[in-house]
Image (tube, rainbow, N blue to C red):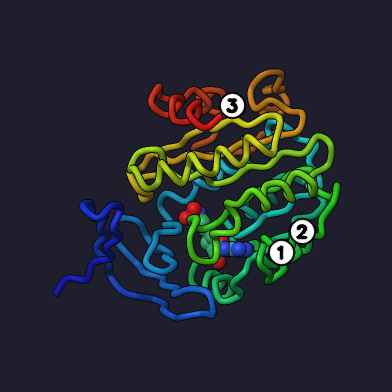
Amino acid sequence: MELWFTEKHTPNVNFSIKVDRQLYCSKSEFQRIDIFESKEFGRFLTLDGYMMLTEKDEFIYHEMITHVPMCVNPDAKRVLVIGGGDGGTVRELLRYTTIESVDLVEIDALVVEACREYLPQTAGCLGDPRIHIYYEDGLKFIRHCENEYDLIIVDSTDPFGPGEGLFTREFYGNCYKALKETGIMVNQHESPFYQEDAYAMQRAHKRIVESFPISRVYQAHIPTYPSGHWLFGFASKKHHPVRGVDWARWNSLGLKTRYYNTQLHAGSFALPNYVEEMMRDVE
Ligand code: SAM
């Protein structure tokens, strides 16, 4: 008998991975949490049946959501991560010795617990003393922050269920307020390819454009996300994501990365025409 994990990317498209065994299954107050083991992608985490990360391709997502803003502003010292309970984003941030503290606001303690037990590749660094974990709703947490952070990374689930509030105008406006005067916010921005995802992406983009003076979108290829074509949002008070960036400074840090490099960083902001058009439609 064969066991397969299947996620519906649209009502007419399925994405399946053959599963060797299920390592973990539970239902928290917020969502169903599963961790599987597979030959092709190693271990993988799903929430309510949606793919969050696999051991094989998580480096692409976590490097792109972290090193792009850190290259633009390597002086970032105080960082807020919203979501991201698997620890992958935090792992990449901790590689910068100049970062003084990372506040991780994850709504679901059970995600952190499960990842610590079964996904050490991402969660292994969650005990670092520079990290402060808050088990709270990011939407509520951010309401009380002002002029505190150099960088906010929104490493959330999709815009439904517990993650819904993290795609609202209120949330982005409060992120703006929570950032210092040279602050940057980066968020996972959904995919432009399938229609439902594209609508969500446009909605988020419109709201971010209304909240920040600089707002651009960049892309990466993530094989296990719908269509494989994934976007990130870069919103900022002062820094442009490409113009004026000191590439040599980031390269001098000597960080070894598997996906990110400074040429790819610059190129990732060059979007296909149909995506540019979708952005323009809501700007
Ligand atoms: N890389 C992933 C992706 O794009 O599919 C995101 C992974 S990470 C596991 C997302 C995390 O956001 C989940 O652990 C979820 O519990 C958390 N989350 C969802 N809504 C949240 C909220 N309102 N506040 C804080 N964390 C939230």
Q: Can the viewer see residue 28?
A: yes
Estimate the spatial distance between the alpha carbons at disc 1 and disc 2, rounded to whole Å.
Answer: 5 Å
Q: What mark, if any, has residue 143 been given in the picture?
A: 2
Q: Earlier in the sequence, mark 2 or mark 3?
A: 2
Residue that mark 1 sits on: 140
* Callout 2 touching callout 3 (CB < 8 Å): no
Disc nearest the viewer among 2 and 3: 2
Q: Earlier in the sequence, mark 3 or mark 1?
A: 1
For the view shown, which residue lies furthest in the top direction? 244
Residue at 80% from the left image edge and 54% from the top image edge: 101
* The label number, if any, that marks residue 262 in the structure image: 3
The x and y percentages for residue 260 are: 54, 35
Q: Which residue is drawn at 42% across and 29% down?
A: 275
Q: Distance between the residues labelled 3 and 1?
A: 35 Å
Q: Quadrant of residue 81?
A: bottom right
The structure residue drawn at horizontal position 78% and vertical position 63%, both measured from the top left corner, is 129
Evaluate if marks 1 and 2 touch, with contact meaning CB atoms under 8 Å apart.
Answer: yes
**Which residue is at a point 54% across and 80% down the rendered structure image?**
29
Q: Number of callouts in the render?
A: 3
Q: Which amino acid does label 2 sit on?
A: Arg
Q: Quadrant of the C terminus?
A: top right
The three-letter amino acid code for the residue at tag 3 is: Thr
Measured along the vertical axis of the image, is residue 43 above or below residue 267?
A: below
Res. 85 in view: no
Element class at badge 3: helix
Q: Nearer the viewer, residue 261 or 170?
A: 170
